[in-house]
Amino acid sequence: MRENETRLFKFPKFSDLIVFEDDNLIVINKPPFIASLDEREGGEINILRLAKKYYADAQICHRLDKETSGLLLIAKNPETYRSVSIEFERRRVNKVYHAIIAGTHTFTDLKVELPILNQGSKNVSIDRAKGKAATTIFNSIRYFNHYTLVECKPITGRMHQIRIHLATQKAAIVGDDMYHGKPVYLSQIKKRGFSLAKNEEELPIMKRFALHSRYVDFTIDGKKFEFEAPYPKDFATLLKQLEKFDS
């Protein structure tokens, strides 16, 4: 975990994160390096605490990994929380994530169905005997010389599902050291005209794993909700550098 990044990260105002709000629901574009819920270590700010300061009855309807950015649904009352939870349980919430992965991969409706075992302490593994069913569909969006922008559609919602399913395809998300994904350095893709000052250490272009919750849609009481979240600055910067130097 990038603890230094967490300490240096400036937490935004909760109101600045909101992409939609009505009497029952808040949808935010979660920044990276903020946990969705209270962590065991405690002490750190998180989205749930920020949401409750903004609206006392707020409840997080699902969670994103701390480093993952993007759309997060927050209920403003127990009825909405229950309704959204039912939609998740019945797998009627369509979620789309974007990831930048190592290597050039041609995924066309690739369905990965590998059961995931939650071993606790945020550790999971593929276990065909003891794991719970997990399905993700992958489609390549944009190809670079050494990387690929991929659309990820999790049908189930297991911990680290997208990350570990991509790793099984030898397509780990860049920067995801837990699953052997290596960060991207400008010196790797910009062969000419790159130099560092003496004794200067090169930092990766993106200081976390490149996963963003891009799109979600669902229906409650006959009303369809549909949202899309723009890339945060670090994700957009990495894409821009790949387009410039790795295309």
Image: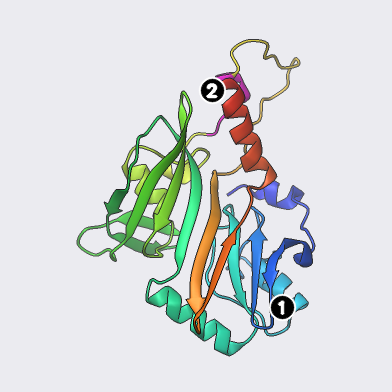
Task: Describe the element under mark 1 as helix, strand or loop.
Answer: helix
Q: Which mark is residue 246?
A: 2
In this view, the residue in front, 114 or 37, is: 114
Q: For the residue marked with disc 1, what is the amino acid? A: Lys
Label 1 CA crowd tier, 10 Å (few <14, some 14–19, many 20+): some
Instruction: Please give the name of the residue rendered at 55% of the width and 66% of the height, measured from the top-left corner.
Output: 226
In this view, the residue in front, 115 or 45, is: 115
| Residue 68 shown left or right of residue 28 in the figure | left
Q: Which mark is residue 52?
A: 1
Q: Residue 188 lies in magenta, yes or no? A: yes
Task: Describe the element under mark 2 as helix, strand or loop.
Answer: loop
Is 59 drawn above or below residue 34 in the view shown? Answer: below
Is 29 drawn above or below residue 37 in the view shown? Answer: above
Q: Residue 195 lies in magenta, yes or no? A: no
Is 12 drawn above or below residue 189 in the view shown? Answer: below
Measured Cα–Cα span from mark 1 to mark 2: 43 Å
Residue numbers of the magenta segment: 183-189
